[in-house]
Amino acid sequence: MVLLEVKNISKRFGGLQAVKNVSFSVESGMVKAVIGPNGAGKTTLFNLVSGFLLPDGGAITFKGEAIHGRPPYQIAARGITRTFQQVRLFSHMTALENVMVGCHVQSRAGFFAGMLHLPWTRQEENEIRNRSVDLMDSLGIAFLAGAEATSLSYGQQRAVELARALAAEPAMLLLDEPAAGLNIRETADIARLILKVRDRGVTVLVVEHDMSLVMDITDEIVVLSYGEKIADGRPGSIQKNADVIRVYLGEDDA
Protein backbone atom coordinates (compact mmCIF):
# COMPACT_ATOMS: atom_id res chain seq x y z
CA MET A 1 0.00 0.00 0.00
CA VAL A 2 1.31 3.46 -0.93
CA LEU A 3 1.62 5.56 2.25
CA LEU A 4 3.24 8.72 0.87
CA GLU A 5 2.98 10.02 -2.67
CA VAL A 6 4.87 13.04 -4.00
CA LYS A 7 3.65 14.33 -7.38
CA ASN A 8 5.56 16.90 -9.45
CA ILE A 9 6.65 18.84 -6.38
CA SER A 10 8.71 21.99 -7.01
CA LYS A 11 10.40 24.70 -4.94
CA ARG A 12 12.35 27.77 -6.04
CA PHE A 13 14.42 30.16 -3.94
CA GLY A 14 14.84 33.29 -6.04
CA GLY A 15 16.83 32.23 -9.09
CA LEU A 16 17.64 28.77 -7.66
CA GLN A 17 15.37 25.87 -8.62
CA ALA A 18 15.98 23.70 -5.53
CA VAL A 19 13.41 21.00 -6.41
CA LYS A 20 11.90 20.58 -9.87
CA ASN A 21 8.91 18.36 -10.68
CA VAL A 22 9.96 15.53 -8.39
CA SER A 23 7.64 12.53 -8.10
CA PHE A 24 7.99 9.30 -6.10
CA SER A 25 6.02 7.11 -3.72
CA VAL A 26 6.80 5.29 -0.48
CA GLU A 27 5.02 2.06 0.34
CA SER A 28 4.01 1.19 3.88
CA GLY A 29 6.60 -0.78 5.84
CA MET A 30 9.64 0.05 3.74
CA VAL A 31 12.85 2.02 4.27
CA LYS A 32 13.35 4.40 1.35
CA ALA A 33 16.33 6.73 0.88
CA VAL A 34 16.75 10.04 -0.92
CA ILE A 35 20.36 10.50 -2.06
CA GLY A 36 22.31 12.88 -4.23
CA PRO A 37 25.35 15.18 -4.22
CA ASN A 38 25.48 18.32 -2.06
CA GLY A 39 22.95 20.85 -3.32
CA ALA A 40 20.78 18.20 -4.98
CA GLY A 41 17.66 19.35 -3.08
CA LYS A 42 17.37 16.49 -0.58
CA THR A 43 16.78 18.52 2.58
CA THR A 44 14.50 20.94 0.71
CA LEU A 45 12.41 17.94 -0.34
CA PHE A 46 12.23 16.77 3.30
CA ASN A 47 11.17 20.25 4.41
CA LEU A 48 8.40 20.22 1.81
CA VAL A 49 7.10 16.82 2.94
CA SER A 50 7.19 17.76 6.64
CA GLY A 51 5.58 21.19 6.16
CA PHE A 52 8.57 23.38 6.98
CA LEU A 53 8.41 24.78 3.44
CA LEU A 54 5.48 25.46 1.12
CA PRO A 55 5.76 24.03 -2.41
CA ASP A 56 5.49 26.26 -5.47
CA GLY A 57 3.73 23.48 -7.32
CA GLY A 58 2.76 19.83 -7.16
CA ALA A 59 1.03 17.74 -4.51
CA ILE A 60 1.94 15.54 -1.54
CA THR A 61 -0.52 13.00 -0.20
CA PHE A 62 -0.23 10.89 2.95
CA LYS A 63 -2.65 8.04 3.56
CA GLY A 64 -4.56 9.38 0.57
CA GLU A 65 -4.97 12.88 2.08
CA ALA A 66 -3.36 16.01 0.67
CA ILE A 67 -0.85 17.44 3.18
CA HIS A 68 1.10 19.96 1.08
CA GLY A 69 0.69 23.46 2.47
CA ARG A 70 -0.25 22.24 5.94
CA PRO A 71 1.83 23.45 8.93
CA PRO A 72 4.28 20.99 10.52
CA TYR A 73 2.18 20.38 13.64
CA GLN A 74 -0.79 19.27 11.54
CA ILE A 75 1.39 16.93 9.48
CA ALA A 76 2.92 15.51 12.68
CA ALA A 77 -0.57 14.93 14.08
CA ARG A 78 -1.41 12.93 10.94
CA GLY A 79 1.49 10.58 11.54
CA ILE A 80 4.73 12.01 10.09
CA THR A 81 7.59 12.95 12.42
CA ARG A 82 11.17 13.85 11.59
CA THR A 83 14.70 14.38 12.81
CA PHE A 84 17.16 17.01 11.58
CA GLN A 85 20.76 17.14 10.36
CA GLN A 86 21.77 18.79 13.64
CA VAL A 87 20.72 17.07 16.86
CA ARG A 88 18.05 19.14 18.63
CA LEU A 89 17.71 17.65 22.10
CA PHE A 90 16.57 19.73 25.06
CA SER A 91 19.52 20.60 27.28
CA HIS A 92 19.24 20.21 31.08
CA MET A 93 16.77 17.38 30.54
CA THR A 94 17.51 13.69 30.78
CA ALA A 95 17.40 11.36 27.80
CA LEU A 96 14.16 9.89 29.16
CA GLU A 97 12.57 13.32 29.56
CA ASN A 98 13.48 14.15 25.96
CA VAL A 99 11.75 10.97 24.78
CA MET A 100 8.73 11.80 26.94
CA VAL A 101 8.39 15.12 25.08
CA GLY A 102 7.73 13.12 21.93
CA CYS A 103 4.85 11.30 23.60
CA HIS A 104 3.04 14.55 24.37
CA VAL A 105 1.96 14.85 20.73
CA GLN A 106 -0.51 12.07 21.55
CA SER A 107 -1.42 13.26 25.09
CA ARG A 108 -4.72 14.79 26.17
CA ALA A 109 -3.41 17.21 28.81
CA GLY A 110 -3.09 20.83 27.75
CA PHE A 111 -1.01 23.59 29.33
CA PHE A 112 -3.50 24.65 32.01
CA ALA A 113 -4.45 21.10 32.96
CA GLY A 114 -0.78 20.31 33.42
CA MET A 115 -0.23 23.44 35.54
CA LEU A 116 -3.12 22.49 37.83
CA HIS A 117 -1.65 18.98 38.41
CA LEU A 118 -5.05 17.36 38.14
CA PRO A 119 -5.15 13.66 39.13
CA TRP A 120 -5.81 12.46 35.59
CA THR A 121 -2.88 14.50 34.24
CA ARG A 122 -0.55 12.92 36.79
CA GLN A 123 -1.80 9.49 35.74
CA GLU A 124 -1.21 10.34 32.09
CA GLU A 125 2.30 11.60 32.89
CA ASN A 126 3.11 8.29 34.59
CA GLU A 127 1.79 6.41 31.57
CA ILE A 128 3.96 8.54 29.28
CA ARG A 129 7.02 7.88 31.43
CA ASN A 130 6.40 4.13 31.41
CA ARG A 131 5.78 4.11 27.67
CA SER A 132 8.98 6.07 27.07
CA VAL A 133 11.01 3.67 29.21
CA ASP A 134 9.55 0.71 27.31
CA LEU A 135 10.37 2.39 23.99
CA MET A 136 13.97 3.08 24.98
CA ASP A 137 14.29 -0.50 26.22
CA SER A 138 12.99 -1.90 22.93
CA LEU A 139 15.61 0.14 21.07
CA GLY A 140 18.37 -1.00 23.43
CA ILE A 141 19.07 2.46 24.89
CA ALA A 142 17.27 2.25 28.25
CA PHE A 143 20.65 2.52 30.02
CA LEU A 144 20.80 6.16 28.82
CA ALA A 145 17.49 7.15 30.45
CA GLY A 146 18.84 8.99 33.50
CA ALA A 147 21.74 10.76 31.80
CA GLU A 148 21.54 14.43 30.89
CA ALA A 149 20.93 14.34 27.14
CA THR A 150 23.66 16.78 26.12
CA SER A 151 26.27 14.86 28.15
CA LEU A 152 25.89 11.82 25.89
CA SER A 153 28.13 11.01 22.96
CA TYR A 154 26.97 12.32 19.59
CA GLY A 155 25.92 8.85 18.49
CA GLN A 156 23.91 8.34 21.69
CA GLN A 157 22.24 11.73 21.21
CA ARG A 158 21.24 10.65 17.70
CA ALA A 159 19.68 7.50 19.15
CA VAL A 160 17.74 9.49 21.77
CA GLU A 161 16.50 11.92 19.11
CA LEU A 162 15.30 8.99 17.02
CA ALA A 163 13.49 7.54 20.06
CA ARG A 164 11.85 10.92 20.73
CA ALA A 165 10.54 11.08 17.16
CA LEU A 166 9.31 7.50 17.45
CA ALA A 167 7.55 8.28 20.75
CA ALA A 168 4.97 10.29 18.82
CA GLU A 169 3.80 6.95 17.37
CA PRO A 170 4.18 8.01 13.73
CA ALA A 171 3.22 5.97 10.72
CA MET A 172 6.23 7.47 8.92
CA LEU A 173 9.57 8.70 10.22
CA LEU A 174 11.70 11.14 8.21
CA LEU A 175 15.41 10.93 9.06
CA ASP A 176 17.62 13.75 7.80
CA GLU A 177 21.27 12.63 7.69
CA PRO A 178 21.04 10.26 10.72
CA ALA A 179 24.70 9.18 10.32
CA ALA A 180 26.12 12.71 9.98
CA GLY A 181 29.13 13.14 12.26
CA LEU A 182 29.15 9.52 13.39
CA ASN A 183 32.07 7.10 13.34
CA ILE A 184 31.87 3.62 11.81
CA ARG A 185 30.66 1.92 15.00
CA GLU A 186 28.06 4.61 15.72
CA THR A 187 26.83 4.43 12.12
CA ALA A 188 26.37 0.67 12.49
CA ASP A 189 24.39 1.29 15.71
CA ILE A 190 22.12 3.78 13.94
CA ALA A 191 21.59 1.31 11.09
CA ARG A 192 20.41 -1.31 13.59
CA LEU A 193 18.05 1.23 15.21
CA ILE A 194 16.53 2.17 11.85
CA LEU A 195 15.83 -1.48 11.10
CA LYS A 196 14.27 -1.88 14.56
CA VAL A 197 12.03 1.09 13.77
CA ARG A 198 10.96 -0.57 10.52
CA ASP A 199 10.31 -3.82 12.38
CA ARG A 200 7.93 -1.91 14.67
CA GLY A 201 5.80 -1.20 11.59
CA VAL A 202 7.00 2.38 11.02
CA THR A 203 7.79 3.39 7.44
CA VAL A 204 11.10 5.27 7.10
CA LEU A 205 12.17 7.90 4.57
CA VAL A 206 15.82 8.84 5.00
CA VAL A 207 18.22 11.38 3.49
CA GLU A 208 21.80 10.14 3.83
CA HIS A 209 25.28 10.62 2.34
CA ASP A 210 26.75 7.38 3.69
CA MET A 211 26.27 5.02 0.75
CA SER A 212 27.25 1.89 2.66
CA LEU A 213 24.50 2.64 5.20
CA VAL A 214 21.98 3.36 2.44
CA MET A 215 22.75 0.15 0.56
CA ASP A 216 22.57 -1.92 3.77
CA ILE A 217 19.18 -0.80 5.08
CA THR A 218 17.01 0.48 2.24
CA ASP A 219 14.39 -1.20 0.10
CA GLU A 220 14.31 1.59 -2.51
CA ILE A 221 16.33 4.70 -3.35
CA VAL A 222 15.45 7.99 -5.05
CA VAL A 223 18.38 9.88 -6.56
CA LEU A 224 18.30 13.66 -7.04
CA SER A 225 20.67 15.84 -9.05
CA TYR A 226 20.28 19.62 -9.23
CA GLY A 227 16.76 19.32 -7.86
CA GLU A 228 15.54 16.74 -10.37
CA LYS A 229 14.92 13.02 -9.95
CA ILE A 230 17.29 10.97 -12.10
CA ALA A 231 16.59 7.48 -10.73
CA ASP A 232 14.22 5.57 -8.46
CA GLY A 233 14.47 1.88 -7.68
CA ARG A 234 16.05 -0.99 -5.76
CA PRO A 235 19.58 -0.53 -4.40
CA GLY A 236 21.04 -3.02 -6.89
CA SER A 237 19.61 -1.20 -9.90
CA ILE A 238 20.67 2.20 -8.53
CA GLN A 239 24.28 1.00 -8.20
CA LYS A 240 24.30 0.07 -11.91
CA ASN A 241 22.41 3.13 -13.18
CA ALA A 242 24.53 5.05 -15.69
CA ASP A 243 23.07 8.45 -14.77
CA VAL A 244 23.75 7.87 -11.07
CA ILE A 245 27.31 6.74 -11.76
CA ARG A 246 27.89 9.86 -13.88
CA VAL A 247 26.56 12.17 -11.15
CA TYR A 248 28.73 10.63 -8.46
CA LEU A 249 31.86 9.82 -10.45
CA GLY A 250 31.75 12.33 -13.29
CA GLU A 251 32.08 11.89 -17.04
CA ASP A 252 34.94 9.89 -18.53
CA ASP A 253 36.58 12.17 -21.09
CA ALA A 254 38.94 9.47 -22.38
Image (cartoon, rainbow, N blue to C red):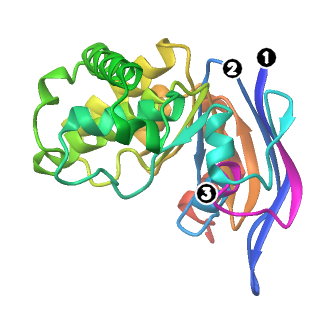
Query: Does residue 254 appear left or right of residue 242 in this picture?
Result: left
Q: Secondary structure at mark 3?
A: helix
* N-term mark: 1 or 3: 1
Q: Residue at x 32, y 33 (%)?
A: 99
Contact between marks 2 and 3 (CB within 8 A): the answer is no
Query: Does residue 216 appear left or right of residue 108 in this picture?
Result: left
CA gap between label 2 and label 1 equals: 6 Å
Contact between marks 2 and 1 (CB within 8 A): the answer is yes
Q: Quadrant of the N terminus?
A: top right
- Magenta range is 48-60
Contact between marks 1 and 3 (CB within 8 A): the answer is no
* N-term mark: 2 or 1: 1
Vertical arrangement, residue 44 with respect to residue 135, above or below: below
x and y percentages locating residue 15 in the rendered image: 76, 87
Vertical arrangement, residue 213 with respect to residue 46, above or below: above
Query: Does residue 242 appear left or right of residue 153 in this picture?
Result: right
x and y percentages locating residue 45 in the rendered image: 67, 56
Can residue 7 be seen in this snapshot? no
Name the disc covering residue 42, or none.
3
Q: Residue at x 82, y 63 (%)?
A: 10
Mark 2 or 3: the one toward you: 2
Front residue of 178 and 187: 178
Return the residue at label 2: 28
Q: Residue furthest bottom?
A: 15
Residue 252 within the magenta-colored segment of the rendering: no
Name the disc covering residue 1, or none.
1
